[in-house]
Amino acid sequence: MMMKKLNIGLILAALWLSSCSDLLNTEPEQNISDEGVIVDEKSANTALVGVYDALQGYATSNIIGVDLASDNVVNYNNQNNLVPDLTPNNAGGGFSAIYKMINQANFIIHLVPGVQDGFFTQEERNQVLGEAYFLRALGYLDLVKTYGGVQLVLTPATGPDTHKGTKRSTAQETYAQIGADLDQAEQLLKETINRTRATRFSVYALKARYFTYLQNWEQAEINASKVIAQAGFKLVKPYSAFFTGKTTDESIFELVYSTSDRNSFYTNWLSPADGGRHDYIPAREFVSLLLDPAKGGARKSLLKQTAEGSWDLIQYGKPDGSSSVFVLRIAEQYLIRAEARASKATPDFTGALADLNTIRSRSDVPASALTPASGKEAINLAILEERRLELPFEGHRFVDVVRTGRSATIFGAINANRKNPDFNILPIPLSAIQTDADLIQNPGY
Amino acid sequence: MKNYLFKSPRSGRSGQWIALLVMLFWSVNSNAYAGPGELTGKVTDKDGAALPGVNIQIKGTTQGTVTDTDGNFHIDVAEGQELVVSFIGYVSQQLRPGRQSNLTVKLDADQRQLNEVVVVGYGTQERKNVIGSITKVDPTDVKSIPVGSFDAQLQGKVPGVQITSNTGVPGEAVTVRVRGATSINGDNDPLYVIDGVFMNSNSMQTTNTGGKATSPIADINPNDIESLEVLKDAEATALYGSRGANGVILITTKRGKYNQKAKVSLNASYGWAKAAKLWDLATGPEHAQLVNEWWINTGKDTPSLNRTEANRPFRPVSEGGRGLPEEQKTYDRLGEVFQTAPLQNYDLSVSGGTASTKYYIGGGYTKQESILKPITFNRASFKVNLDQKISDKVHVGVSNSFARTFRNQARAGDGPAGGLLQAALHTPTYLSPANENGELVGRAGFDNVTLLLQNYDVKSVSLRYIGNLYAEADILPNLKFRTSWGLDFNNYDENEYWNTFLITGSPNGFASANNGQATTWLNEQTLSYRQKLGAKHTFGILLGNTIQSDLNTGTAATGRGFANNSFKLISSAATTTGSSSWSKKNLASFFSRVDYNYGGKYLLDFSIRADGSSSFGADRRWGYFPSIGGGWRVKQEGFLKNVAVISDLKIRASYGVTGNQNGLGSFAALGLWNSGSSYQGNPGIAPQQLANPDLQWERTNQLNAGADISFFGDRLGIEFNVYRKYTSNGLLSLTLPATTGFANYRSNTAEISNKGFELAIRSVNFQNSAFSWITTFNVARNINKIEKLENPLEYGSRSLILLQQGHPLYSFWVYKQLYVDPQTGNTVYEDVNKDGKITVADRQINGSIWPKFFGGLTNSVTYKGFDLNAFLAFSYGNKVYNHNKFFGESGGARDAARVIFASNNARWQKPGDVTDVPRPDGVNVNNYRDGGSRWLEDGSFVRLRNLTVGYTVPVRHISSLRIYATASNLFTITKYTGLDPESSSSSAQNEQGIDLGTPPQPRSFQLGFNLTF
């Protein structure tokens, strides 16, 4: 009797043991494990959507990081200190979040060519890869303009030590990599109009910006012209239409959000009465320029006066979180071309002023008093001023002042510390330095 | 004497105190009386050793005497009178002496104490055979402390178990640490096992209450608990394998008895709770004065600011100012949010049994309002335990408990928006709650307190079932088989609605709802065999297995944009979002224990558990947790047998390995991609975590040595343990280089040690049929140290807490204020690196949350029908950061943005002033620097945790009626200048000891009765 019971017990135990290994393999339902994550056309596309999501993850922090280092924006609680003293402790700019996007783009660039899926045509692969190369280029361009040369990571991370030993590249090397990615993207993408995703036009527009940073004026003009020549891209009127509407003709690449995929940037800008936290406001001196009909013109519609009297930015002010971030818009291309025309070896001042006045007239500002005879210096100064008014809160001002060599005069006039050229790039966040032995802080911080 | 006992051990000279306590037994002396009918005699134990202090009473009278130090006595007895000879730890005797002069009474030792049954892992043991460090707690005398959960009631009751209440909100999570803390990113909570079911002790709350969390332990009605065992060393916990490293709390609920007629028990109480004190705030005029001083001081320091006497903020309204300081009014907000809170509790139970069935049925209802409006904790529960004999050899049974816990929750922790206590405490007192139009408005970024109280709508309901079904069979006389199935199911439903009057609800209202289910089921089988071989050898074998599965699911929704404040449901919101979550982990285990006992003298046991867990890395699927223990019952040796003073002596030692996998997360070892990263409504995926196939449990090795000794027939019992725990493979979330694209990586790279001692003393100071006085005392010390941590980790507001190798966990990281310069009024900080500047490099570790020692002292006295119980808990040497005061002592620099505490009035004003409060200057710089040590305070305390007086009323026809009055936290002796040295604004594990915006534990008073018939 007893033996029988024990036997049954043993059999049960054996059965149970064999089921044990199944028991101990639980698979998540919310996530998928990383083996075989990009295996077909569909999964490649969802991974690409993930890269755009990662761009959403850093876009506004990069904008505010560099805008706070400029003379356009101040912290609401520290308005006296117009140009903040940056320290690695409070460094912004989205350093880690940009690398998160780059890593996702790397997965696609690395895996998509090898995907075994007969229905995944070469054309479709090219589209996916082209967008990934474009986004990686954008990420590195945002890094290099903010922090200088950075560590170049071109393969996906599969473990904590995948990129161990990767030192910082120089700014030149970083730019070279961006150029290579942009060339790849240009080849792979088609000339279609899709204002919310990367196309060959987005590549032209980003190349125009890229060559402006490199002061390669011929290429800057050529690329800007390719975009301007496309009838699908137009300056919209009134000025405010580009941000009150959505994916207007103004946009070349607009990062869109919706009520279910919210852009919380409005909370940083609006006052508590409008549902925000009022972290930042446009700098007082700059507000007066925007309000000046002869300077800002219609661009004063970026601002709204609150009951307390302060002027708040409403470019990102849709309180349902559906405001877009404007990565590339046509107005910038006109100003790039103006600058390129004025600066190239054989300047075209007439063309430069024509582009400048196109921008001014859209905002009902009188045409510039300058003439081709005013000369390169004066025209370029006017273009810099116009860029400040036209693209004030999209992360351009800081890098424009720095790359034109005017930071000591412009920023230094407000905060003498800023005469030190070390402060022409932001510090790398302390937390990133502390966790990466290969990462050296920028000089002066 | 009584006075002396109430003088608590805060002096720290506990040794001296114990010595006096021991002397006390001897002071009870006989009152010899010689005369007619005199009887002399001697009382000894059964081996002939003299017993001093034995009580000898003439039956039916109050006359009596006590034996002297040699066991001798004299007493006057009349013919026919009977003597009762009684002594604690011995069986009483009644005898009718003849006319004899030298009577010798031999008393037999009462083995009850030693034969006490202790619940151990997967079984029970007699106290005398226990090798591990196990404390059995009778929860009766703390059960009326109004804190919601039984673990909070146990503070100070168990040596080596540190329980911190964090908040005065009933039913909120308390911190329970058994012999220190072993983990940084894993969990440090003990494992709770109720009637064999592994209970979920992680809060399911998702609503933001400012860092606070509800306690799932509060779903258990303390009245249903029969006994609690706390398992501390590896010998006791190794059978719980990868979940045993933080100690195990075994909860046994009440059951009926066979052959007992139905016993009905009713307990009801009603009472009130109130804050013992509130913060002392600067008045409106004082506030204004300090702001003006700050303005002028900073203007002098930095002339470019153009701050002068002429344009000071509080100047006459006619000059464009806010009015002179003396014109300011003072508005009280604290009085509005604090209340005298009613408490009520009712328990009704019936238990009993027939020859083959026994049952316990209990129901309870408790409602405790917090002293902070509108917080309420409300629990209704019932319990059914049933056991049925099927035959002589087989019996089956069930345990069921069901509870519904309702909470009205307010944000009693950190956070300005919706933070009730912060709004009341941190809004400057001079600011009117209404604007010039008479409308109520929030000030300084906080909500308006009145509007908050009127519109608060944050509620949760927890439905909890914990149950278990078992069958037990005696296969052979010595071989027992048991199988059981257990379930812990918790449905947690929470809803919040913020209307447009509140910051969180602006501009058009916000609502969120969350519904979560946590389900744990487990099945276990054990086979136990016990055999005696020959006269001296006894051995036992236990074999068992368990399978366990934990499933957590949740659905959440939010809504924004409501038509008006009458619409509150998410379905009526303009914009809604939804999400859901799912996770599962499985655990399969085998375990065994072998014990051997030689002649009742030498005890040896060995146990091992193998745990296979789905959350471990693929290469580390199984973990093995062995332990070995030995005991020597020295009293059983010949040389001690005849020493009557020592009634028992046992020496024990154990060593073993336990693990901790809590906090590991269900899929922590897998490389994962996450969905939900969408763009333009298209679904996207993104990498979420890197795989770590080597990820495993934390491993804690523990060595324990102890002794149990009792004297004078168990009148004085002492238990002492020393231990050393070393945890390796500690879970650590490593921050990864940015270039990886991942934020962090779960690794097993931290190492932490804990070592310490525990001492528990129980003394029967006096006992006879009419009067008894029992004292218990415990004290423990734990030394915690981070042995290995590559990079220091900062936690808490303003990085107040630093985890750094070589220091204890939760050390405070501060700028040490040396003094305030009497000439300049500026704070002088210690310049650690002597570079002439105060920079972050000068921040230093200065104390931690860990006490140097802690424990409790209980005195219970009964006299005839009266009973009195006084229970003190104490902690010495722990630090608290008074973060409320940091904000409130900003010297005017925060101007209209924060309240100023009255303590700031003691600031330096002119050369020669000697004070530790510097002159007002900028915020977060120099004098009022973030992380200044001025607000790091000594959190030592002695608290009269509970005082109960009861009277058992003699009534016919009922078995007992006791009425009682009980008070908790009647006094707290502490140097801490905040309200409660135990306050902590966050229940996050690594952010303890920061007191911000938390209500204190209240003083409470309750009246009640227990009726049994």
Image (tube, helix red, strand yellow):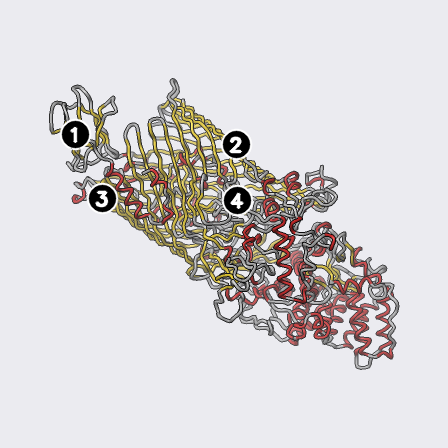
Nearest the viewer among B94 and B953 is B953
Asked which secondary structure carries label 3, the reply is loop
Marks 1 and 3, Cα distance to the nearest angstrom? 38 Å
Tell me whether marks 2 and 1 sit on the same chain.
yes
Q: Vertically, is B79 above or below A89?
A: above
Give the residue type at disc 1: His
Query: Can you see residue B883?
Result: yes
Asked which secondary structure carries label 2, the reply is strand
Kindly identify which chain the residue marked by label 4 belongs to.
B
1 and 4 marks in contact (CB < 8 Å):
no
What crowding class fits label 2: few (fewer than 14 Cα within 10 Å), some (14-19), or many (20 or more)? many
Q: Residue B716 at what x, y percent from top left?
A: 27, 40
What crowding class fits label 3: few (fewer than 14 Cα within 10 Å), some (14-19), or many (20 or more)? some
Q: Earlier in the sequence, mark 4 or mark 3?
A: 4
Marks 1 and 4, Cα distance to the nearest angstrom? 64 Å
Q: Vertically, is A347 above or below B326?
A: below
Mark 4 = which residue? B203
Marks 4 and 3, Cα distance to the nearest angstrom? 46 Å
Mark 1 = which residue? B74
Q: Earlier in the sequence, mark 2 or mark 4?
A: 4
Seen in the image, is B205 located left or right of residue B867? right
Q: Which of the two marks, 3 or 2, is nearer to us in this view?
A: 2
Nearest the viewer among A98 and A17 is A98
Seen in the image, is B166 located left or right of residue B725? right
Mark 2 = which residue? B380
Mark 3 = which residue? B601
Q: Which of the two marks, 4 or 3, is nearer to us in this view?
A: 4
Give the residue type at disc 4: Ser
Tell me whether marks 1 and 4 sit on the same chain.
yes
Nearest the viewer among B367 and B728 is B367
Give the residue type at disc 2: Ala
Residue sitting at 53 percent across and 47 percent down? B584
